[in-house]
Amino acid sequence: MSIRLTALTAPEESSAGRRLAWLASGPDGTPVGHAFLRLFTKDGQRHLAEMDIQVHPAERRRRAGSLLLDAAVAAARQDGRCSVIAQAESGSPGAAFLIATGFRAALALTYARLSLAAADHPALTAAAETPHAGYRLAAWEGTVPDELADTFVASRRAMDDMPMGAVDYGTVVWDLDRVRAAASAVAARGDVLHAVAAVDRSDGSIAGFTELVVPGSGTGDAQHYGTAVLPEHRGRGLALWMKAASIVQARARHPHLDGLLTDTADNNPHMRRVNDELGYLPTHTAHEYQLDL
């Protein structure tokens, strides 16, 4: 079967990067698959591209996936990228395809879900309300308040040593514009960004944070975006405290939510223990795959 590729989007740049896309179609014009390629444009990640390829199950093994991959990799090379990453669920056809085309597994991720109907809410409330000497909790919706903006940006370095396995993810450099752009992107698609932070009472600086994105409808599952504590504040239970408070607040503000989703690198045992203690149950494992160009 003859497959035709069509470029769908212009290389427009946003705060996150440039996004390219291709559509694969059959001789009669019926779509059979697509590919997206994200070209990171921020300092510290200009060597990297992120790819997602999807082919309809009935159309697999007819070269659509290979043609989409060739187009995406060629675009990454042309833009001077050194690495392309992609994610696939363990044991899936996508994982087999990536391995067969030269990608290597670089990071294992455990996905987990907390069912709000089955959660131990008294225990979660107790964890959220347990005082932590020298700290207080702050919370906001959407963009960080001006009075916490500078210290929140500074606290983003807590993510710098996040376990990433062998993925050449580079360094994400945060500034206030990037923080605000990320919040605006969530709002633009109609969702709600909730943040909870642990604040050091001695100087008012943020010691750690956790972020949760709730669907605009207030139904279905919300998605954790990240939880991190600065190195100098670790070992004091702040991650569990903040995440418990985030769960309690999400349930109170969005009573029709079904659950909360999270994913954690397998080489991050501390955060996996936090999730276990809060009642999250594993749903599946995926891998980040990397192709060195």
Image (tube, helix red, strand yellow):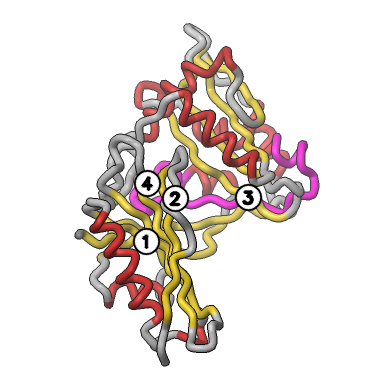
Is label 1 in a helix, a strand or a loop? Answer: strand
Q: Earlier in the sequence, mark 1 or mark 3?
A: 1
Residue 291 higher or lower than 165, as above or below: below
Residue type, mark 3 in image: Leu
> Which residue is denoted by mark 3 in the rendering?
260
In magenta segment, residue 87: no
Q: Quadrant of residue 37?
A: bottom left
Q: Earlier in the sequence, mark 1 or mark 2?
A: 1
Dot 2 crowding, Cα within 10 Å, few <14, some 14–19, many 20+: many
Q: In terms of depth relative to the viewer, which is nearer, 20 or 176?
A: 20
Give the number of the disc on residue 264. 2
Residue type, mark 2 in image: Thr
Give the number of the disc on residue 268. 4
Q: Is residue 149 left or right of residue 107?
A: right
Whether tag 4 and tag 2 are in contact, CB under 8 A, the answer is: yes
Is label 2 in a helix, a strand or a loop? Answer: strand
Q: Earlier in the sequence, mark 3 or mark 4?
A: 3
> Which residue is denoted by mark 1 in the rendering?
86
The x, y position of residue 241, in whole percent, is: 56, 31
